[in-house]
Image (spheres, coloured by chain):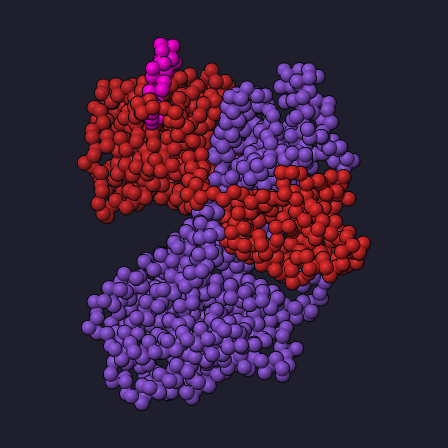
Chain colours: A purple, B red
Amino acid sequence: MVTVENSDAVFPAGTVEGVEFARRVPLPPPRPFLDTLRANLKETLFPDDPFQQFKNETGSRRFLVGLKYFFPVFQWAPRYNLSLLRSDLVAGFTIASLAIPQGISYAKLANLPPVLGLYSSFVPPMVYAVMGSSKDLAVGTVAVPSLLIASMLGKDVPPSQNPTLYVHLVFTATFFAGVFQASLGLLRLGFIVDFLSHATIVGFMGGAATVVCLQQLKGMLGLQHFTTATDLISVMESVFTQTHQWRWESVVLGSCFLFFLLLTRFLSKKGPKFFWISAAAPLTSVILGSLVVYLTHAENHGVQVIGYLKKGLNPPSLSNLVLSAPHMMVALKTGIITGIIALAEGIAVGRSFAMFKNYHIDGNKEMIAFGTMNIAGSLTSCYLTTGPFSRSAVNYNAGCKTALSNVVMAVTVMVTLLFLTPLFHYTPLVVLSAIIISAIAGLIDYEAALHLWQVDKIDFCVCMGAYLGVVFGSIEIGLVIAVAVSMLRILLFVARPRTTVLGNIPNSSTYRRMDQYSAAQSVPGVLIIRIDAPIYFANVSYLRERITRWTNEEEDMLKSKAETSLHYVILDMGAVGSIDSSGTGMLKEVKESLGRRGLQLVLANPGSEAMKKMDKSKVLETIGQEWIFLTVGEAAAACNFMLCTCKSGMVDEAERENIV
Amino acid sequence: MVTVENSDAVFPAGTVEGVEFARRVPLPPPRPFLDTLRANLKETLFPDDPFQQFKNETGSRRFLVGLKYFFPVFQWAPRYNLSLLRSDLVAGFTIASLAIPQGISYAKLANLPPVLGLYSSFVPPMVYAVMGSSKDLAVGTVAVPSLLIASMLGKDVPPSQNPTLYVHLVFTATFFAGVFQASLGLLRLGFIVDFLSHATIVGFMGGAATVVCLQQLKGMLGLQHFTTATDLISVMESVFTQTHQWRWESVVLGSCFLFFLLLTRFLSKKGPKFFWISAAAPLTSVILGSLVVYLTHAENHGVQVIGYLKKGLNPPSLSNLVLSAPHMMVALKTGIITGIIALAEGIAVGRSFAMFKNYHIDGNKEMIAFGTMNIAGSLTSCYLTTGPFSRSAVNYNAGCKTALSNVVMAVTVMVTLLFLTPLFHYTPLVVLSAIIISAIAGLIDYEAALHLWQVDKIDFCVCMGAYLGVVFGSIEIGLVIAVAVSMLRILLFVARPRTTVLGNIPNSSTYRRMDQYSAAQSVPGVLIIRIDAPIYFANVSYLRERITRWTNEEEDMLKSKAETSLHYVILDMGAVGSIDSSGTGMLKEVKESLGRRGLQLVLANPGSEAMKKMDKSKVLETIGQEWIFLTVGEAAAACNFMLCTCKSGMVDEAERENIV
């Protein structure tokens, strides 16, 4: 049998009826409430301990450290040199060649004048270069929020009916998105983004990519009218009720360019050296497409073109913000939803590349940077920007070294805005559609979904919920489904915690789950139950019933086998991370109801939190400090010892009951 | 130092570089997906295993068992005898004497014709007697849902403007509440009620009691007009802007009866034998009050009376249900909210008394009973009923034995309805106000709030949030605040799990938290981190950063002390109850990032769930099965052994790195 370990000097030995047992679980030293509160708040809001660097610094040094903290440009700029510049120049020009066609395409996706896509690649990257802490992120507009803006704001103010108001609402939504992002960062609430799980994002992005590709059918088929809904059924209806409107010229041109773009994508996957093939392909397509249209005058044969693009830099747009009813609320809602999605993408991208290069990204700081960049953008005729994956990957592969590559891109776009806009007059829209499809098709990550199915069925449900919700409902429905299922999972984990019966691993004092370890053997007369979650209000009723059921089942089993009857119930509290007032109440009730059946409740390995709460609620007194043990092994040994003493007549059975 | 335990035959021994180590953590046997799903669903929805009694039964016996399951009356009726009947008769008459004045009072609170309160004490108790499983619950209307009905429906259809429609809406809301309650029970979703924590209920009930008492100022001061808002400020404004309308006759009469009622309450607390003093007091007050008014003709001097009460039993009300726009939605909303609150009270009361008498209450079955009783009620001109605490306590103290006491009460109320209604003509409203105040003041449980402050500060915040929300906002606001804070706590527990560093308890192979056990000593070259929550998407970013920070801090500390540098990071997975796909991804990343720093990741005691997920996601391969140990002690011993062998030159340092 298991032997009782010797007590040592550090732990006051406990005694049960004069017999000495093992070591005790100490009560944590009392700690002032404000101290605990401060520690908890710090752990919740400042888990990365950003204040550490300010310690042991004088006033002026502190200011400098703070400046470097909020404007990382002051960290890297002093050490900047020519070799870094060379790398950043190459990367900057490369991403600019991607940014121009993509910017125009996504602006069309958001039902905005194409030039806004260029504006958005000018101011925000400059801001990010000063405030952002990622070295690899390339700032720009992204497909999913663009589509979301179009569908959410378009419902309220159709861009075809009131284009000016629509554009103003887009600026307003961008402004709110920026304010929301910056406040999340300032209030250290960055963890909200963590609630968008990987599974949610895979499903959501896949669904959004499907929807965006479907929307491109308008451009590819050369249709003039198209549904404003985004779900599969409406789009299919819109496409197939207009078969007589399909333009073969558009289809042929689009298919050629789509094939070209997908081919370059495929080629560039041969190795990181070939990244430039797919990076340069969109601009090449735009140039080729424009030339084709210019030479063949295809614009008169059903191929739609961009047309006139205004020359000049971003006009200010502060006075355009719509800050009054009735349209402000929809802009606010759009801003918050698109803001958080953009944030999730930007931060995930930043973190991924930071991990490759082994440097650290502070999520909350990034949020402030994104927020400031969008506020600045909304005042200078830009719409929502973030760090898109595709562009950042090209930036990384092109060998960028610092955020200066964003500045290079911005300057290139500026030159384009000042002098080169007329060149885009003949660019066919169908090429833009092809660019969007080729850029976004990769977001449908069926391999990740397959992986989720293999690893975790609930995550797969979350993923498919998001995907199907987006494809058959709307982008918001998909998001709500996925977040709700994810939350439900957490709540269910707590509401229905796993309880398992432990058994002794032979020849050791280790106790493990009987259902996991086939070798584990139950201890006669003792039932050991392990609770695998915090004991909270949400699960006390369940746990009370479950413990009763385990006890009933054990007693029935023992009765049927005519073995030693049950005397002790040990609760292994090792995995009970926290307990609330309902939880302590439940323990008291369990103690009492077991007592009525002549059973003794024993606790093993409660954490300091549980000890403190049990002490304060007097549950510790009810249970009796002598029935609380450091390990399950010691608790079982003590119970065993008591049982043996009873049997051998050293302590009378009736007396044993009295000990309690 | 800790010795490595011998491996035994049951666990395949693992080897690290030819050296044999301890026992291994087995992979759980593969289990078909549908089996797991069925087991999980059963545990979530049927934790009490209601099907067990149907096992090993033939068809007709099964039907009988099922009948007994859904209609507990068939369980106790066959064994009913005269001695039980005697007890139930006494209890039934006692609660009837309470039910009549309370029923009338609460109906006034809900702005309904007083006779509806009597109707509601006739049909629903009969239904409950057949279907309910509690022996002590006395069915009737309750104050808080009554007030909620008045404030929620009154906003849409003021009862003063359209009393008929208002009454019809109340029936409709009751109908929806019943359907909602029954469906929760049938769908086995009873655990939703568990999300209303004890702290929420204390705060919410206290707030509601305060609000209800404030509303009684109307009756006590004899005011004709009163605000429909329930918040403190509106009520105070309404009271003090009408000082000239106060009627001293009302105030005097009310104060006398309130004093009488509180006195009887106080006397009855002297012992359970005196329960009848407070039980009989309301009816006595009504009789006395009516006599006083009848004799003094006080109804002509500002004392308002009930007036004409219709004779006769409940008229049917099926045709009165409002099942069309525009009012159906508000009835639905009211039904769901009041339904869940009534459910929470009824089930809590039923469970409490069941615990006293040591019998079991099935929450889901109770919900079906409550639901059916309210559906039946809504078709027979009753409004929402449940098992109020005050009446059930009187029932219990009066010595009720079965649900038959409800039938006795119902019959008594029936007799009243048929013959005695004219007697209530002169009952002054002010007496009803006094009855409500004395009945409900006890719900302000400041001692429970104080206890919460001492035991758990967050629970106290939840409680005060609910209280202040109800008192200064509205009942719904209070409820939303409390539920939101409670949920946030669960989500925060998962989003910010506690991570602690473990140390060795001297002279043992036990490892415990260094901050809880002052005796615990760190192991040189090894960092042991314990994670106290499931590893879910919501905490992977946090855990990744936190593990990095623990490692950095440990390395800095060791560097400053010039001690053995860090080589191993052990993650104690003992308290990780569950893991999702983001979690396995996080472990892989931690393994890789530690590897880049020359550190080895070791896992100790992962549960079967975690093992399965890690295996399926190939993380087990990445980490290496040989780096997974049964206990922290064995993991630490293995690391120690490796470190010693390296130092003594048996294995070269470089070679050690290669093992990985």
Single out the residue that lies furthest toward the top.
Answer: B82
Residue A436 placed where, x, y %?
Answer: 38, 72
Q: Quadrant of the N terminus of chain A?
A: top right
Occupied quadrant, residue B504: top right
Residue range in magenta is B62-91
Residue A441 placed where, x, y %?
Answer: 40, 68
Residue A108 shown left or right of residue A633 in the figure:
left
Tell me if residue B12 comes above or below residue B414 in the rendering: below
Residue A59 placed where, x, y %?
Answer: 69, 67
- Whether B90 is among the magenta residues is yes
Q: Main secondary structure of the magenta part?
A: helix
Single out the residue that lies furthest toward the bottom.
Answer: A295
- Looking at this view, is B247 or A547 the one in front? A547
Residue A533 shown left or right of residue B396 in the figure:
right
Decide if residue B386 is in sight here. yes
* Residue at (46, 83) in percent of width and height: A414
- Whether A465 is among the magenta residues is no
